């Protein structure tokens, strides 16, 4: 999320939509389901290549300072 939000704020948002739930119930759901979601996300995570390189160029002039970086994934041999 781009900004912090409390369980009480979520409770109020859900109440506006006709769902009555207590903030402590939301906390219990997070404690119960967050590890399961994390497991599923990690299981579906795509593998990353074993070799990476980083190109870096720094340009400096009286008017401009610029740093350029680019990562390159190398195909396995």
Image (cartoon, rainbow, N blue to C red):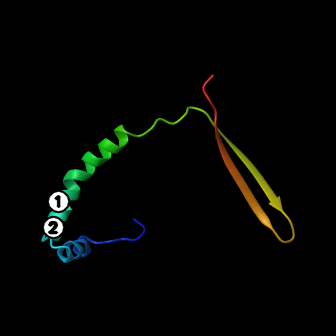
Identified at 86% across, 66% down, the residue is 61
Disc ID at residue 24: 2
Identified at 41% across, 40% down, the residue is 45
Contact? badges 1 and 2 (CB < 8 Å): yes
| CA neighbours of label 1 inside 10 A, class few (<14), some (14 to 19), many (20+) | few
Q: Residue 1: give x, y in percent of width and height.
A: 39, 65
The image quadrant where one finds the C terminus is: top right
Left or right: where does residue 55 sit relative to residue 40?
A: right
Q: Residue 65: give x, y in percent of width and height.
A: 78, 65
Position of 1 relative to 47 (above/below): below
Left or right: where does residue 65 sit relative to residue 31?
A: right
Identified at 32% across, 71% down, the residue is 5
Furthest toward the right, the residue is 62
Position of 11 relative to 73 (above/below): below
Left or right: where does residue 67 sit relative to residue 32?
A: right
| CA neighbours of label 2 inside 10 A, class few (<14), some (14 to 19), many (20+) | few
Furthest toward the top, the residue is 77
Q: Residue 24: give x, y in percent of width and height.
A: 15, 67
Give the secondary structure at mark 2.
Answer: helix
Position of 65 relative to 34 (above/below): below
Q: CA distance from mark 1 to mark 2?
A: 6 Å
Q: Quadrant of residue 11?
A: bottom left
Q: Residue 37: give x, y in percent of width and height.
A: 28, 48
Left or right: where does residue 36 sit relative to residue 41?
A: left
Disc ID at residue 66: none
Q: Quadrant of residue 39?
A: top left
Furthest toward the front, the residue is 17
Identified at 24% across, 70% down, the residue is 7
Along the line of sight, the residue nearer the viewer: 64 or 20: 20
Give the secondary structure at mark 1.
Answer: helix
Q: Mark 1 sits on what residue?
A: 28
Q: Quadrant of residue 68?
A: bottom right
């Amino acid at each position: 999320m781009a900004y912090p939000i409390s369980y009480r704020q979520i409770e109020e948002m859900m109440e506006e939509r006709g769902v009555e739930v207590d903030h402590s119930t939301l906390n219990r759901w997070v404690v119960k389901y967050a590890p399961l979601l994390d497991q599923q996300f990690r299981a579906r995570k795509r593998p990353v290549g074993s070799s990476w390189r980083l190109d870096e160029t720094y340009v400096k002039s009286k008017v401009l300072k610029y740093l350029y970086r680019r990562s390159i994934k190398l195909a396995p041999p």
